[in-house]
Image (tube, rainbow, N blue to C red):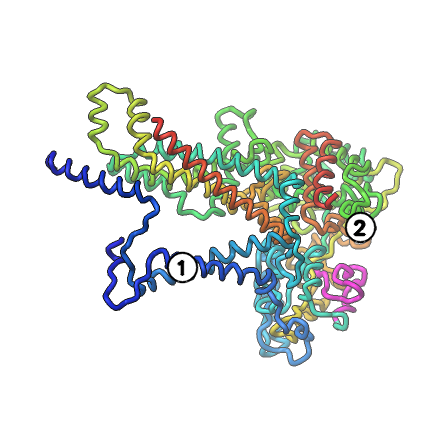
Amino acid sequence: MNHVLSAGRPGRTPVSRRSFLAGLGATGAGAMLAACGGPGATATPSSSASTGGTGSGTVGGVTNFYHWRSEDRAALDSLAAGFAARYPGASVTQTIDPSEQYQSTAAQKARDGSIGDALTAFRGTQFNQFTEQDILADLSGSVAVGNYVANLITPGAQDGTQYGFPYQLIFNMPLLNTDLAEKAGVSEVPKDWDAYLGMLDALKGSGVDPIAWPGNDPANAFQIINTLAMNNGPTPEMFIGIQDGTYKATDDWWITSLTQFQQLSAYFQQNFAGASNDGVLALYSQGRAAILPTGTYQLAQVRAAGGSFPIDLAPLITTAAGTTPAFEGVFNATFILAVNAAAKNPAGARAWVEFLSEPANAAAYANATSQHVTVKDVTYENPDLQALAPWVEKKTLLAPRFQFTDADIRSAVENSLVAVVTGSSPEQAAEAAQAIIDEKRGG
Amino acid sequence: MSTTDTTATDVRFAEVATRARRNPRRRSSRRNDPRLLLFVLPAAVLYLWLVLWPTVQAVQYSLTDWDGLSVAYRNLGLANYDRLLGGDTVFGQAFGNSLKFMLAVVIGQTTLSLVLAMALQRNTRTNIALRALYFFPTVLSSVSVAFVWSFVYDPTFGLANSLLSAVGLDSWQQPWLGDQSRAIYYLAIVQIWFHAGQMMVVYIAGLQTIPADLYEAADLDGVTRWQRFRHITWPLVAPATAIVVAYTTIQSFKAFDLIFASTGGGPNHATEILSTLIYNSAFRNFEFGYAAAQSVIFVVLIALVTVLQQRAVALSARRA
């Protein structure tokens, strides 16, 4: 090695290894100073962000639609074909990220408008993030506003401005195989906690797993927190209260919830703590488990996996017999359709959102994807959607799980559920959760 | 080589060694042609731009409350480090899990790869085929491996519980990745399966440099197999062990994708390691400043553990 490096010729300025290393060091120091320019220095939003997304102009060109639902690709492609037929010269492409990735990186990717002329947001944390970063255009004046059920699109508004339209109406409640329930002698969904446990006993006695809980898949496993808390919480904003310090995880209402969840775990399948979503989906779809405690967003997956039995919703009614529960169930309004404020094709993006918001197109989407929608005057032809339609009229609470805007605090509360079904007492689990919440809140 | 030649060579080596000891800091007096530095420049620029600069930036971010998106941020001084070291239970848990995972993987992977290498050291057709077989998992992507093992560990339909049931050991069935006290070790098994073949190749290269006459001489002296291993193989394979241990340590600390795709750090943070925690801080909570502080501590920890391990391996070889 030295032979090669020392092959200098007369007349050339020699450079020693020491001076070369010194040069590298100086460059490194320069890099350090440059780095001290500040974190935001390389992340300045496009100046077009404040002006884009007005949606004026002729509809044409390519509109990119950015979302996380790969299972909806075919349905949306079909709708895109209808859009192109209505607006000659216009087309829609889809950019789809897995939901976890979408939550993590969508803001960064979409903020300069390079992708996602039209885009979507999860209710809660991500929607707030998008509005704080001025990523969403104002849709308050859109003709689409009138197409929606007014109280279902409030999660897409902030400070009086409508930034997006929550498109899907989901019921995050346990799905009950009513064939298995009838075989076990259960003719109606229980209306109090003792009756609920009675139903589970009957199901267990009939030889099936009463509940298939995906303990190793937090995104699905903790949907159960919605109905568990809906009538136990001191107010409908119980988790906002835990996050802002108004309530504590050690309060009686949460200890009661943990105790009830511990009782419930006696009816979960064997080795539930390690169960994946695919595993429990198979158990439920094959009729080996009676309840899938996730939500209607899995209806299409159950059908695709071969489950052909009738399904009803069986929310956890945690109140005592003779007490009228405040809420019969929960719903979530999500998949918030929006227009990127920095869209390269704002007219196309706005037209695409308005197109999806029309009742006929929303019905096509709903029937193809087995999802209820928040659009008015939609006729559901899908049998599952027809069967569950009465839930639209019931007294339901906006899913409280999505009140959390701090993922660490949400994890602390959710993990207390894991703790009580794996050996901790409700009090111990609650204290451990509150300790993490206190740390996070700086208390 | 004659005895005379050997002696002369030894004398020359001794002189060089003596000069080096007398002037340990002395640099070569030979000068380099500056044009040759052009060959180094592209790599140096890339290294500065893609490695050094982000590293330095991470230190700076760690002193702020930057959320990863906003232009605005506040300087917090050492507040992120205070929070990390003084009052973050989950960080402490992730730190402990990282050490448990690292120890399990380093011990398991080093042992298994050395055993495989010793068994497959000779260049026979069968051994070469087996080496390829054991090396194969290394070429898979981490996420694929995670999915494959998720099916193995699935408590309802997985291979592990099915096998136990097939041999009548139903009572031994486990929730596997749902077992908070052992899930991190079950993931360590996956990591060992994933990379033991790769480390086996390093060991085979090291074993094949050991002169055969040493073993012949030992056989003539009537040593046991353990004595052969302890006094010949282990000390002479120490350079390979140092590489294997250092590489495995760093690899185990960075096993982000495997763990993220298998458990996401759950249940209840039982498999949370520092790299998954950093991801969650940065991309779930959008606390980039805090995540940067975690990264800085992570880097220091890896450096410290690697140095300690190299010293331990060197000491072990000297004692043997």
CA distance separating discs 2 and 1: 59 Å
The x and y percentages for residue A379 are 74, 62
Q: Nearer the viewer, mark 2 or mark 1?
A: 1
Left or right: A391 as drawn, with respect to A349: right
- Can you tell which quarter of the image residue B119 is in? top left
- Can you tell which quarter of the image residue B202 is in? top left
**Which chain does tag 1 point to?**
B
Q: Is residue A149 magenta?
A: yes
Left or right: B26 as drawn, with respect to B288: left
Please report the bounds of the magenta region as a residue range. Answer: A144-167
The x and y percentages for residue A117 are 62, 69
Left or right: A21 as drawn, with respect to A237: left
The x and y percentages for residue A223 are 70, 45
Residue occupying image coordinates x 49% and y 30%: B163
**Which chain does tag 2 point to?**
A
Residue A301 against residue A280 in the figure, above or below: below
- Residue B44's tag is 1
